[in-house]
Amino acid sequence: MLSAQKSSARLRNLKWHRIRPKIIEKSDSESKYSPEFASGLWAIVSPYHTNERLNENIPCLSSSKLKSDEYKSYNHCLGRRSLRKNSTFSIDSKSNTDYDNAKPFSQIPGPIGLPYLGTLFQYRKGPFQRFDIDHLKDAVIARYRQYGAIMKETVSGVTVVHLFHPDFIRTVFQSEGKIPHIAPLMETTQRYRKLRNLSPGLGNSNGDEWYRLRSAVQQMMMRPKAVTAYLPLVNEVASDFVDGISRIKDSNGDVPNFLNEIAKWNIESSGMTCFEKRLGCFDAGKDSLPQKMIDANSEIFRLSTVLKFSVPWFRLFQTPTWKKVTEAEDFFFGTGQGFVDECVSEINRISERGELTEDKFLFMAYLLSRPELTYKDISIITLSLFGDGLNTTSPTLLWNLYCLAKNQDVQQKVHEEVCQVIPENQPITAEMINKLVYLKAFVKETFRFYPIGLDVARVPQENLVIGGYQVPAGTHVEMNNFVLFSLSEYFNEPEKFLPERWLRGGDAQNIHPFILTPFGHGPRMCAGRRFAEQEMYVVISKLLQRYRLEWHHEDLNQKFQMLMIPDKPATFTFVDRHKN
Ligand code: HEM
């Protein structure tokens, strides 16, 4: 392995302009970096990652195995109860004979709709409307109540089989193999990226293309140790966020529309992780660039929801709504691409001066060091880490703060644990995070009460028997676990907010391992999970060290905008613990 100094010397000789085409220009950006360049960078970044760079397997596969072992112990714990459960539903299997003997796909129950458009008009204003899209969660629950644990429905040309039983969910996950296929996470994003000739990214690709991208980032995004390298940056931004609350709260301690403040924290934190650049979000006014990015992002999600439940003309023509989506995407991605380009130039400058050390530009230098990634890939992976948290980590954090404010006894326990583990005014370390067991149980319970996603999707590549029905390879399957979260069949006293249920000695061993999977499961599990969890643990801890959170307003409810966001602006009251 080359020393960092030697590699920097090699880097100095590289011509960056040749390997740095702009992503938006449909240029030759598929071309790969020169192997010398990539291996030079690898020599610098590898101390932070791993010594093995070739033929890496995706470790999630071993986590699938773990889950299946967990499942065995779950079955063991339940003993006869699990047998009774299984007897209600035919035991799933996928042998050819079982498949041939199963009931045909056409008999899977579900609502009957129009050709192609299916039940679309049940979700749209008009004489056939049955459901309000804002309350899609209730619509899915209503389907479960009417049709049972497996049902199928066609909306706008897409037929989806919905699963509402953890054993069925297990069947799908355990048959997915090394390269699970999915439907795109968001159709509009997939179309936009195609339109602009961008890399589809992880959540919009399948097969070998997905495997190539995922293998390239697996180690650095999913290995907990690799992610802790970003803790100093995460700490810095979280501290500034907490300090900033004292400036924005009014004399009652209230901060209105706190989701927007969380979004600023999120984008500031992601800016540091991806580009090691402070974006100045905490001082950002209404017309500032970060605020415009936050607004553009939420517009993309609002309009994508509208399109999801419209007659899908946008698949054929540039409808006005689709044009607005592309404008918002252009703004978001264009600005983000500028950050990527700027960051790469800076790496270039400092490497030319021989000053690129292993602790600088961890994320980007790692990506640049992977010879199998094109500049397009690097851009889309970085922009995913930069932008995805806005729609996922931000609302998740909001629901966590809401649960703390609404459950003062739980807040007290989390606070006590934080005080015990983390000395005040000290950076939070990986060892400290490991000890925050109650906080982690609390976050899980919040996912149960306020899931932010309504489904995890798969397109199985082999025929399956689920619930006694044939589900042919290539079917779009959605697992809607959230429907089970409030059922006493699966949770003791489901209406109670009880983080204790997830602790050792609580109910945890009786909870089906395939029920609460907020980040999905297996090789396609959320690629940002470790980053999201780390950021949430740090920011919640720091907030509670300083403030007690209170809620003095009408209850919040969840509203569907591709993911679940609050149905109204959330005003939290922050009571400074040091002033009492
Ligand atoms: C609390 C926050 C988050 C939640 C609850 C969440 C949830 C999910 C879920 C359920 C999936 C589908 C997994 C599956 O199919 O098995 C997913 C996929 C994904 N998530 Fe997240 N996510 C979060 C944050 C993030 C962040 C911050 C990023 C930024 C990197 C991210 C990037 C991705 C990507 C790239 C995929 C697609 C992975 C693949 O197909 O290989 N997520 N996420």
Image (cartoon, rainbow, N blue to C red):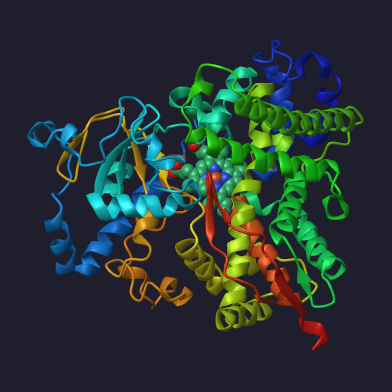
Taking the image as drawn, is residue 229 in sight? Answer: yes
Q: Residue at x 86, y 44 (%)?
A: 288
| Direction from residue 193 to residue 507 in the image, left or right | left
The answer to whether 135 is drawn above or below residue 210 in the figure is below
The one of 286 and 60 positioned closer to us in this rendering: 286
Q: Nearer the viewer, residue 351 or 380?
A: 380
Residue 305 lies, with reference to residue 535, above or below; the image says above
Name the quarter where the C terminus is drawn.
bottom right
Image quadrant for the N terminus? top right
Instruction: Report the front residue among 514 and 292.
Output: 292
Residue 11 in which image quadrant? top right
Q: Which residue of the protein is positioned furthest toward the front in this rendering?
A: 127
Q: x, y (%) of residue 406?
A: 58, 76
Residue 158: percent from the left, percent from the top?
Answer: 37, 29
- Residue 10 lies, with reference to residue 62, above or below; the image says above
Q: In which quarter of the view is residue 333 placed?
A: top right
Residue 75 image-quadrant placement = bottom left
**In this picture, residue 142 sits left or right of residue 303:** left
Q: Position of residue 78 (x, y in %)?
A: 22, 68
Query: In the shown orientation, is residue 157 left or right of residue 215?
Result: left
Is any atom of residue 223 visible in this view? no
How many badges with numbers are in the image?
Answer: 0
Which of these two is toward me, 45 or 77? 77
Q: Position of residue 80 (x, y in %)?
A: 14, 68
